[in-house]
């Protein structure tokens, strides 16, 4: 397995462009199979999760090419509604194909999806939503089978504003007969992006970005050309990295409105941030102030996907901070790794108590999941000495060549295979 080696202690500096959003690209790739013919999607990052999704689409009978940041997808000859178990176990977002396949073929066969081990992420809301639209659902030998001759619009109240369930129901309802109302819908920008793409294909959907989405069913969808929004989590990660290293960077091709929560938190801690249309400048010259309390919650509140990264920043702040994680019960695994680097963090159930220290120290640590891995990278950038990060494949699921991004901003970071790491050390 590859490893990242970081020589820390250097402030980040420079200008960087943000690549397309993984969490927008995955459901949009899934939605593409609902129209027969060629669809072109721009600003698609080269990530492990994206490549797994494309492998699944090819297994279903699609033709898919990924050149640069463009994906060309032809779903004319879909011949299967069965998603292979070995591919589903690699990525949780494969579940997004349930709604589109059910709408396109009338049947879908899936398994429990894989992904990061950050706590329970049930798919019951997905299944309840599809069942409300008229799907018959059967579980047999670890397989989930959904069938429907014709989906029918319905009123669906989500028990929790699940992003995945909201998107799956939206896609399934797009060609259902009648009107579907999704109440307590998730409000993330990626859902707005999916709505915009589906409407470009001929769907009739309104309300994305609010807690009520209305889908008026149409008979068929057409092909289109679409561009994915920038990745707000990547942008937020780089904002935190610049602040944690006492650097100054400029981020281009970003939507500041998607980053309100993290910008607010950083400003409260003393970080200087200026915004000019799609450009954000961040600078942190002094030791940041601790923050009394941060609580993760569904958008537009502070995102769970930036909780690990902001914890590193607060671990270097002046004073005591508290983070409460309300989304995933298993999303504090990075605490142990940060503690090995000198952080003073204790956990009590879903709360982390962070007493800021003057500095962190390089060590050999592990990326336990995608966002924890990003946090460990930030810690390595800010720490004194050398940090070796193992299990880098987790980070590659959501950050396109993170070592090259950070090298462009002046970091001393290199990627090595197991055979070459010993030569460096």
Image (cartoon, rainbow, N blue to C red):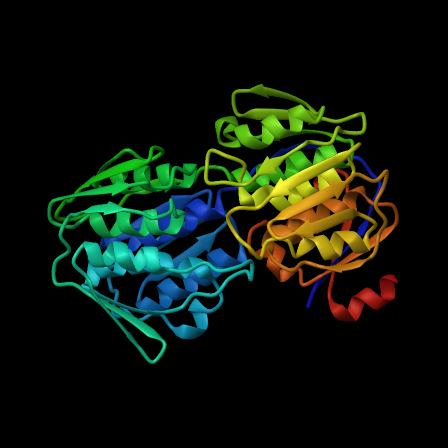
**Relative to 367, residue 305 above or below:** above
Q: Across the whole image, how many numbered discs are drawn on residues?
A: 0
Q: Quadrant of residue 355?
A: top right
| Quarter holding residue 214 | top left
- Which residue is farthest front? 348
Relative to 85, is 57 above or below? Answer: above
Q: Position of residue 264 (x, y in %)?
A: 59, 26
Residue under the image location 64 percent in, 53 percent down: 332
Instruction: Out of 354 and 384, give the one closest to the viewer.
Output: 354
Q: Residue at x 51, y 62 (%)?
A: 115
Q: Is residue 136 left or right of residue 398?
A: left
Left or right of 189: which side holds 233? right
Across and down, in percent, residue 249 comes to 69, 30
Q: Can residue 151 be seen in this view?
A: yes
User: What percent of the width, then of the height, locates residue 191?
Assistant: 37, 41
Name the residue nearer the viewer: 245 or 302: 302
Quadrant location, the N terminus: bottom right
Of residues 44 and 181, the one nearer the viewer is 181
Instruction: Evaluate whether residue 75 shows in this view.
Output: no
Give me the residue at 38% from left, 73% from top: 84
Q: Position of 28 compared to 46: left or right? A: left
Q: Is residue 373 left or right of residue 103?
A: right
Location of the C terminus (image quadrant) = bottom right
Q: Where is residue 30 in the image (x, y as percent from the top left)?
A: 34, 54
Q: Tell me the residue at 16%/58% (across/down).
A: 134
């Amino acid at each position: 397995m590859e490893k990242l080696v970081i020589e820390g202690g250097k402030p980040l500096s420079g200008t960087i462009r943000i690549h397309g959003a993984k969490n927008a690209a995955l459901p949009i790739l899934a939605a593409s199979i609902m129209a027969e013919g060629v669809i072109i999607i721009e600003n698609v990052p080269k990530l492990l999760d994206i490549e797994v999704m494309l492998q699944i689409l090819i297994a279903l009978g699609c033709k898919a090419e990924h050149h640069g940041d463009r994906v060309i997808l032809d779903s004319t000859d879909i011949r299967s509604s069965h998603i292979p178990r070995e591919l589903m176990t690699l990525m949780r977002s494969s579940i997004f194909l349930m709604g589109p396949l059910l709408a396109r073929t009338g049947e879908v066969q899936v398994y429990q999806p894989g992904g990061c081990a950050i706590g329970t992420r049930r798919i019951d809301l997905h299944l309840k939503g599809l069942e409300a639209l008229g799907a018959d659902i059967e579980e047999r030998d670890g397989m989930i089978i959904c069938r429907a001759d014709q989906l029918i619009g319905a009123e669906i109240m989500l028990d929790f504003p699940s992003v995945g369930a909201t998107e799956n129901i939206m896609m399934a309802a797009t060609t259902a007969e009648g009107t579907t109302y999704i109440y307590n819908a998730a409000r993330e920008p990626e859902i707005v992006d999916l709505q915009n793409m589906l409407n470009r294909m001929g769907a009739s959907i309104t309300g994305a970005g609010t807690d009520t989405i209305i889908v008026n069913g149409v008979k068929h969808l057409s092909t289109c050309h679409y561009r994915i929004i920038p990745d707000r989590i990547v942008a937020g990660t780089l904002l935190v990295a610049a602040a944690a290293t006492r650097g100054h960077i400029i981020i281009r091709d970003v939507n500041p409105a998607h980053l309100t929560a993290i910008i607010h938190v950083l400003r409260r801690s003393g970080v200087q941030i200026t915004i000019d249309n799609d450009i954000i400048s961040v600078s942190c010259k002094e030791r940041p102030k601790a923050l009394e309390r941060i609580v993760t919650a569904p958008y537009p509140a502070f995102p769970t996907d930036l909780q690990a990264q902001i914890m590193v920043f607060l671990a270097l702040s002046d004073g005591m901070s508290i983070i409460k994680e309300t989304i995933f019960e298993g999303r504090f695994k990075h605490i142990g790794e940060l503690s090995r680097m000198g952080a003073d963090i204790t956990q009590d159930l879903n709360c982390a108590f962070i007493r800021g220290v003057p500095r962190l120290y390089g060590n050999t640590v592990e990326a336990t999941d995608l966002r924890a891995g990003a946090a460990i990278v930030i810690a390595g950038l800010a720490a004194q000495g050398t940090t070796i990060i193992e299990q880098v494949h987790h980070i590659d699921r959501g950050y396109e060549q993170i070592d090259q991004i950070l090298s462009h901003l002046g970091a001393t970071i290199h990627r090595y295979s197991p055979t070459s790491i010993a030569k460096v050390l």
